[in-house]
Amino acid sequence: MRIISGSAKGRPLLCPRGLGTRPTSDRVREAVFSIIGERVKGTGVVDLFAGTGAYGLEALSRGALKATFVDRSPTASRFIRKNVAACRFEGLSRVVTAPVGPFIKSGGIPEGTGLVFVDPPYSGGEGIKTLMALSENAKSLTRGLVIFECSSSGEPDVIPSGMEIADRRRYGDTAVLFIMVS
């Protein structure tokens, strides 16, 4: 796993061992960033269920202004901090060790956020709960874009009000929804 493009291109990313973290493949990340294109430049990003921080770090490498990484696991947060340091993005990054739902509900999404990456565990219903929390609590996301990763067989049946699926892509057993926030 590595940074695909931008100022930190080629930089390898560390990943915790075991099944607690399911990193997004380079192929899927490359496709996602090809789709969002220049939208990443000059905006703030939030990487929820960050794991290794790959989405947020890729965004910083491609010109995002700042990134907030959120994961409930202290181990994941340690690896994110190591990856942030390896990419030399310490001044642009904030790592938060907390459950995603309470983070959002407490107003944790910073002003100036234009992109939110949501890569929850594929089972357990965290994905739809996160979309609901964003819909209800992230007023700073007006006209923002949520990149939502899930299993191809586990796409949400209903998208919360104030959100609309703009695009949907499948990569093997992974689905990525591009959700506009109105």
Image (tube, helix red, strand yellow):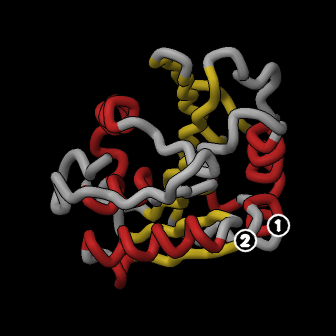
Assess disc 2: are there few (<14), some (14-19) or many (≥20) residues with their C-alpha within 10 Å of its C-alpha. some
- Residue for point 43% across, 51% down: 55
Image x and y of residue 50, in percent: 55, 57
Q: Quadrant of residue 49?
A: bottom right
Q: Quadrant of residue 62?
A: bottom left
The amino acid beneath tag 2 is Ala
The amino acid beneath tag 1 is Pro
Q: Residue beneath label 1, please?
A: 102
Work out whether residue 40 can be spotted. yes
Image x and y of residue 124, in percent: 83, 38
Say whether residue 153 is left or right of residue 45. right
- Residue for point 64% across, 51% down: 20
Residue at the far front in the pictured view: 18
* Quadrant of the snapshot with the C terminus: top right
User: On screen, 66 above or below 26?
Assistant: below
Image x and y of residue 1, in percent: 32, 46
- Disc 1 vs disc 2: Cβ atoms closer than 8 Å? yes
Say whether residue 98 is left or right of residue 15. right
Assess disc 1: are there few (<14), some (14-19) or many (≥20) residues with their C-alpha within 10 Å of its C-alpha. few
- Residue for point 83% across, 37% down: 125
Residue 98's disc is 2
Work out whether residue 143 can be spotted. no
Which is more foreground, mark 1 or mark 2?
A: 2
Q: How many marks?
A: 2
Image x and y of residue 25, in percent: 40, 36
Say whether residue 113 is left or right of residue 105. left
Say whether residue 97 is left or right of residue 67. right
Element assignment for label 1: helix
> In the depicted view, which residue is nearer to us: 39 or 89?
89
